[in-house]
Image (cartoon, rainbow, N blue to C red):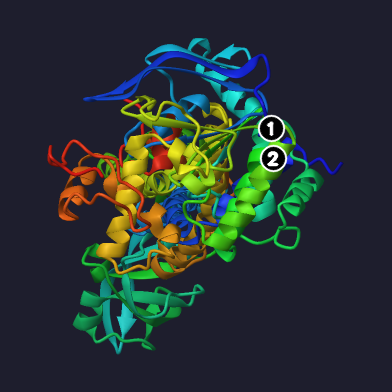
């Protein structure tokens, strides 16, 4: 006797039912996949792009300002050891500059070009950033006043400096010369960009105070709070957008299930006529819903990760590393939404009266 | 003809089933013996299908008792009723009602699944017994009506039910398939199985041990007996009248020859249900005789001075 296990037959029935209803099942899977894709994409973006967004925001300026006297540059730069902290030390001093025989006093702003470049993303430079002590930037106003251009050589103190770029900031730097620190020089202060919300920024400021007891450390509250607000709003927008799309997809799945329940009313009536209990019929239905939810979650999860990667490249200019944490969340949301959307149809199926449904009555459920 | 056993398999007593505005079954009482083949006839709305639904545990009576194999169907829970359906009853439908996405074999196994354990070999043998050994992998849409009905019969019998209930099992079949299906029912009957079959066809009903005629939810005893067979003189006058009016309708209005009218009479019988009988009798001018010359029983619509000779 070739007895087939009940669970084996159950899987066979669920599989046949899912495969045998191609178009409807396709629609339901597409709707679940949409919800899963949105969840995966937004979840992935939220997890992976938090730091990317903060780096983007970092370009809009520092949120901590340090001022002091004769702080070694190396000590300043050591503050950036932790992830998510940018430190741009500076020193300002007036110096005599000679060019084409003309001698004038200019404010020379000494910087660490690599750090400054990251923290002052909005600066516009015609030419390039200085790489070594013999190179400098000229502020646009200064350049126009003294006909300085890229390639111009000027004498600064005892040495000769080549202008490699003309800088436009809209701020006091437009009237200054910006040159890299010379070895052994000390800084008068630093701009710091700390990632995270206002509390994180305050925590970084406190650690700087401990590290530099003599320096004055100011948290630029408006910048820190604006960053926190922007990130918070972005999270809210992501969340709301996700909820709306998941709700719309849930309605679509629910409608598809409802149509399927109506179309198969006779089949359900037949199963009951063959002796199936309500719970046995429901078990098959929930099995199908779980199957649709899982397939939709898998497809949507893959599509969502792809979409997030594309968004990362096209919007932020760098790939988004797939966040594994987003996948279980996607599965839970997609399958949960599918099961929730199936509840009204499951209730209708439980109330189907076999005698009426087999007769083809339009009202085949018990009151 | 199989005689009824001493102890009846089905005992129906004062069975009443009402729907809003309609009494489908009205204080009906009858017994069906073990191994008996009973045909139920009657016009549309006479309560045939309601009786079958109650016997199959798909519906419940409002009052009265229906005892099948010692189990009172009006006194058991819904879950017990589901168990009754899976263990005691085999259903054969006019519309076959096969699961479209399952093949013939799986349709039979479905009944096993709800009964106990699916047995593929057993299901295959059941299909072989109804002549479908080479069609087991076919889905319903790839099977003819007759083949679908045979799958339905195999499914009904797979769990060895004590009671086989059939609702117009040949209603959607051509003559050849009707013969095949009726031969199967004869086999089932010969094997000692109890069969209750609803039919409009006197020819089909004539194969049964006993014919029960229903009218407005009650036994139609107007013929003085309940047994319908090939002998039309034993049919209830109300049924005989409708049958012969149907023959006249076919010959007079549809130009069918009296010799071949027999084959088509079942298809127009439903037209004579209820008020249809009066309308058609009047349309035909209250005919006195059928196309074969036999008298048509007088109806309430016929003139009082109607010549019955």
| Mark with earlier residue (1, 2) | 2
User: Where the N terminus of chain A falls, by quadrant?
Assistant: top right
Measuring from the top left, give residue A3's x and y in whole percent.
81, 40
Residues at circles 1 and 2 in contact by the CB criterion of under 8 Å:
yes
Looking at the image, which residue is at 24% across and 87% down?
A147
Q: In the structure shown, which secondary structural element does the residue marked by tag 2 occupy?
A: helix
Residue located farthest toward the front when viewing the structure as drawn: B309
Kindly identify which residue carries mark 2: B188
Kindly identify which residue carries mark 1: B193
| A113 left or right, relative to B25 | right
| A268 left or right, relative to A65 | right
Q: Do labels 1 and 2 share a chain?
A: yes
Looking at the image, which residue is at 60% across and 46% down?
A14
Between A348 and A152, the residue placed more toward the observer is: A348
Between A331 and A268, the residue placed more toward the observer is: A268
Between B184 and B103, the residue placed more toward the observer is: B184
Picture quarter containing residue B83?
top right
Kindly identify which chain the residue marked by label 2 belongs to.
B
């Amino acid at each position: 006797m070739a007895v087939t296990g009940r669970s084996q037959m159950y899987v066979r029935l669920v599989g046949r039912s899912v495969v045998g209803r191609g178009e409807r099942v396709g629609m339901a899977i597409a709707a679940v996949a949409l919800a899963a894709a949105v969840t995966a994409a937004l979840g992935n973006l939220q997890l992976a792009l938090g730091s990317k967004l903060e780096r983007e925001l970092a370009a809009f300026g520092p949120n901590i300002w340090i001022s002091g006297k004769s702080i070694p540059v190396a000590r300043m730069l050591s503050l950036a050891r932790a992830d998510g902290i940018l430190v741009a030390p500076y020193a300002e001093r007036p110096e005599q500059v000679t060019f084409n025989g003309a001698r004038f006093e200019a404010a020379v702003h000494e910087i660490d070009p690599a750090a400054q470049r990251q923290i002052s993303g909005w600066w516009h430079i015609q030419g390039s950033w200085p790489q070594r002590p013999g190179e400098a930037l000229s502020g646009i106003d200064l350049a126009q006043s003294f006909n300085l251009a890229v390639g111009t050589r000027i004498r600064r103190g005892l040495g000769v400096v080549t202008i490699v770029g003309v800088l436009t900031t809209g701020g006091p730097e437009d009237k200054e010369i910006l040159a890299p620190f010379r070895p052994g020089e000390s800084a008068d202060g630093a701009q710091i960009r700390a990632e995270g919300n206002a509390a994180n920024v305050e925590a970084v400021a406190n650690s700087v105070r401990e590290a530099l007891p003599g320096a004055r450390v100011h948290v630029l509250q408006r910048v820190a709070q604006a960053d926190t607000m922007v990130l918070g709003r972005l999270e809210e927008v992501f969340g709301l957008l996700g909820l709306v799309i998941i709700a719309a997809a849930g309605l679509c799945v629910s409608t598809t299930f409802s149509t399927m329940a109506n179309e198969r009313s006779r089949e359900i009536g037949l199963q009951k006529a063959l002796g199936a209990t309500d719970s046995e019929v429901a078990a098959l239905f929930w099995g199908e819903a779980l199957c649709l939810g899982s397939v939709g979650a898998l497809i949507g999860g893959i599509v969502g990760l792809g979409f997030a990667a594309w968004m990362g490249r096209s919007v932020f200019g760098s790939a988004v590393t797939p966040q594994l944490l987003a996948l279980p969340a996607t599965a839970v949301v997609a399958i949960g939404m599918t099961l929730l959307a199936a509840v009204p149809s499951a209730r209708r199926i439980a109330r189907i009266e076999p005698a009426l449904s087999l007769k083809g009555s339009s009202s085949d459920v018990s009151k | 003809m199989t005689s009824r056993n001493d102890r009846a398999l089905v005992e129906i007593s004062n069975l009443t089933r009402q729907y809003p505005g309609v009494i489908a079954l009205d204080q009906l009482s009858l017994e069906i013996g073990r191994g008996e083949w009973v045909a139920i006839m009657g016009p549309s709305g006479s309560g045939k299908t309601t009786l079958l639904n109650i016997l199959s545990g798909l519906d419940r009576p409002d009052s009265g008792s229906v005892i099948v194999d010692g189990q009172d169907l009006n006194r058991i829970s819904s879950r017990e009723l589901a168990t009754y359906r899976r263990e005691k009853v085999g259903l054969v439908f006019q519309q076959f009602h096969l699961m479209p996405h399952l093949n013939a074999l799986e349709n039979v196994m479905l009944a096993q699944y709800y009964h106990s354990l699916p047995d593929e070999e057993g299901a295959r043998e059941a299909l072989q017994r109804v002549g479908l050994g080479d069609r087991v992998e076919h889905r319903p849409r790839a099977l003819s009506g007759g083949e679908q009905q045979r799958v339905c019969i195999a499914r009904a019998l797979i769990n060895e039910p004590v009671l086989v209930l059939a609702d117009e099992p040949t209603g959607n079949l051509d003559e050849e398939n009707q013969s095949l299906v009726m031969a199967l029912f004869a086999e089932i009957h010969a094997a000692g199985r109890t069969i209750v079959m609803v039919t409009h066809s006197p020819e089909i009903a004539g194969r049964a041990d006993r014919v029960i005629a229903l009218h407005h939810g009650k036994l139609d005893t107007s013929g003085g007996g309940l047994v319908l067979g090939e002998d039309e003189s034993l049919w209830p006058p109300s049924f005989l009248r409708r049958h012969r009016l149907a023959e006249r309708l076919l010959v007079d209005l549809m130009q069918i020859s009296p010799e071949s009218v027999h084959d088509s009479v079942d298809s127009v019988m439903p037209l004579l249900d209820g008020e249809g009988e009066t309308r058609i009798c009047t349309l035909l001018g209250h005919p006195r005789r059928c196309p074969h010359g036999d008298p048509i029983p007088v109806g309430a619509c016929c003139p009082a001075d109607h010549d019955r000779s």
